[in-house]
Amino acid sequence: MSIHHSKALVSDDFEAMNRLIVEKIQGNHDLIDNLANHIIQSGGKRLRPLLVLLSSQACHYPGQQHILLAAMIEFFHTATLLHDDVVDESTLRRGQQTAHGIWGSKASILVGDYLFTLYMQLMIAIGNMSIMTLLTDISHQIARGEIMQLSHQHNDKLSIDEYFAVIHAKTSLLFAASTASGAMLAKADDAIVKGLYAYGLHLGNAFQLIDDALDYCSDAKTIGKNIGDDLAGGKVTLPLLYALQKSTPEQQQKIRLSITQGGREHLPQILEALAATDAIAFTKNRAREEVDQAISALEVLPASAYKDALAGIAHYAIEREH
């Protein structure tokens, strides 16, 4: 099942969520309207709110608060993107100029903060203490993950375990929050909540692993950002870590130099080292392992089209090109 079929399955809810997002961000201030609309309408998959909608329906949720929950998750995610692009000094996202590149750092940070307040307002409106506890804890851990990633910038001694700790915190936890909170809203059994939480974690790991592979094996038009952005910014990801283990001493020296210095000066040689060590294939295989674990975690759910859609999104995670 493609991601488009998954969206079609909850199309009414998805449209209601989009209307709520537009309603919440429009009519406040021109800068907020323009900047928030730029990033929200810039072609994102809305994957995390889709996971909220699918997981709540897989657990037979009968109400309407899942619309608020999905919009809330999207506001949080969008706020983190605005801040990320400032930290990373990114100029391209999803094939378009970043808000940071158009309006500058100050506006991006402040509008990101504003979207965080919308996230908190919707959290209070939902009024579910269990969900509030989960999401505030995960928000805290995501912020820690971003700080961890920043502290590991240009670190040529980063371990694979440290790398996975970073992606767990900064990426996978929000996937887990999206799926688990949908189940919690539906008052699902603890086993189902835990299963969907595990599904989200493994799905998030797979998405990040594929992102990290695509940074070295795709092209700017397809992935919507510049090739080698991670290397240029001194981000150490699994393809580089694996290549460091398997490459020749000369290649290792070049990789370490590129990590510590940043930039794309040595990108051709790095790509050669990644190819010689099958680092991209290794990274994609790790992503497949994560997808297998994600699908296994869905066994706690009864059979339904929504469960099939969640499994389909897991397959999409490793089949996508952007």
Image (tube, rainbow, N blue to C red):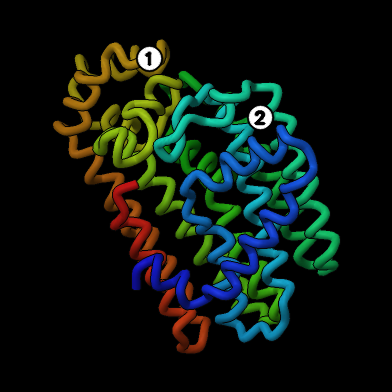
Q: What residue lies at 85% left-to-right and 67% top-to-bottom?
A: 127
Nearer to me, 155 or 219: 219
Percent coordinates x, y for residue 234 in the rendering:
44, 21
Q: Which mark is residue 263?
A: 1
In this view, 287 is above or below 250? below
* Picture quarter with the N terminus: bottom left
Q: What residue lies at 81% left-to-right and 67% top-to-bottom?
A: 126
In this view, 85 is above or below 200? above
Percent coordinates x, y for residue 136 in the rendering:
76, 52
Q: Residues within 10 Å of mark 2 (few under 14, many from 20)?
A: many
Q: Quadrant of residue 29?
A: top right
Q: Secondary structure at mark 1?
A: loop
Which residue has dot 2 on it? 108
Q: Which mark is first along the chain, 1 or 2?
A: 2
Q: Callout 2, which amino acid? A: Ser
Query: Can residue 310 be seen?
Result: no
Furthest toward the bottom, the residue is 303
Q: Quadrant of residue 312?
A: bottom left
